[in-house]
Each structure stands twice: as structure tokens, then as C-alpha cells.
Image (cartoon, rainbow, N blue to C red):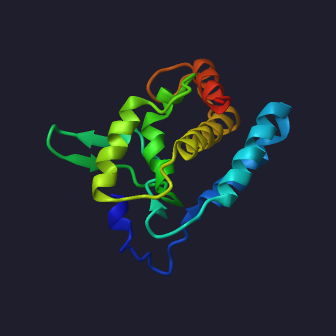
Amino acid sequence: MHRSTLSFKPDSKSNYLSVFDLLKETEEYLANEDEKIRHIFNEIKTWLSSLYKNMQNYKLTHGDHREANVLWDGKKITFIDFDEPVYNWFLADIVRPFINLFECNKKIPEELTFFLEGYQSVHLIDSASNTNLFYFARMKAMEMYLWTKNIWKSETIPGGETQDIWLKSLRRIIFIE
């Protein structure tokens, strides 16, 4: 999927957001958060600003790349639900479906390691360090945590889990060290 975006040229009417636009939106939700969350947000923002961008690691991404939006029939993968494309590092898309495996985990989840080996056999990315994987997981968890607290109106999240349990899980990912 990411390799195909290398030749994608949006028409002049397209106005896709970037990860930095999402950060600005997420930052607006920090006012009612504790100092620890604000500190980690700023740490993530600083880290993200320091990352190198090139055509191999940063371009238009799916934006909501998660299990429910990836169909597998045993032979072929089909991606669906392209309503949130965003300019971002490919690793942000890659980490998203594995986000729950980062909860309380001090090492890169084995499933993600296997996925990255396959991914890099068709599209090499130079930013796939362990540090970057953890930061992308924390960044996505922070975004989902603050969005859920401030926007989501239901007591349950898609998939049936309660919002309270989901938020606690996301906090554990945010506070990975």
C-alpha cells in the first residue's frame, strides 16, 4: 500500500492533513490533562519534529490502519475505509494495528517484528528503529486517548470495550519507558 503512494499525485482540490495538523488538533485537548500527559506530548512533538522525511518513509498514509480496516481472505489483503488519509511516516500506519501489543511491553512485539521483516522485503524504510516504533506507538496512543476523552460520546468503543478500560489501556502505552 505504501509503495503505491510513491507515485500518487493528489489533484489540486485535495486537502489532506499532515501528522503535524493532527498534532495541533490533539494539543487543543491537553488543557484538562495532568502534567505528565502534557510532558509526554511535548516529548513526542519534539521527537517527531526531529525525524527525517523522504519519499521512502513519509507520504500519504491510510490514517486509520487497524484490524477492522484490513481484510484478509487467506490469500489476499484488502484495505478499506480510506476516509482519513494523512501525510505521515509509514511507521505510524504500520504500528497502528499492533498498538494494543505495546501495552506494558518494554520490547517490540514479536508480531510487529515479523510484519516489519515482510514489509521491508518489498519496501525498505530507514526509520524502523526500536526507538521510533515505541514513539510512534506512544504518539498514536496519545492521539486516540485525547480524542476519545474529548470527542467520543459513547460508553463503549467500536469493538465493544468500555471507554474507561480503553482509556486505561492507552495510558499504559503512553507511559511506556
The number of callouts visible is 0
Look at the image and tell me in which quarter the N terminus lies. bottom left
Say if residue 67 shows up in the picture. no
Residue 56 occupies quadrant: bottom left
Which residue is at the front of the view, 124 or 149? 124
Q: Name the quadrant of the C terminus.
A: top right
Question: Which residue sits furthest bottom?
Answer: 12
Left or right: where 41 falls relative to 166: right
Which residue is drawn at the image coordinates 41% and 77% (left, top)? 9
Taking 20 as reference, is 66 left or right? left
Relative placement, left or right, of 62 versus 105 is left
Residue 141 appears in the picture as rendered: yes
Q: Residue at x 15, y 37 (%)?
A: 74
In this view, 34 is above or below 140: above
Residue visible at 68% across and 59% down in the picture: 50
Q: Position of residue 95 (x, y in %)?
A: 47, 42
Please state which of residues 142 and 12 is positioned toward the viewer in this rendering: 142
Q: Horizontally, is 65 left or right of 76 in the view? A: right
Residue 117 vertical placement versus 174 (above, below): below
Residue 109 at x, y percent in the picture: 44, 30
Residue at horizontal 40%, vertical 55%? 82
- The image shows residue 160 at horizontal and vertical percentages of 46, 21
Give residue 148's position: percent from left, percent from top.
Answer: 63, 34
Give the quarter of the image for residue 155. top right
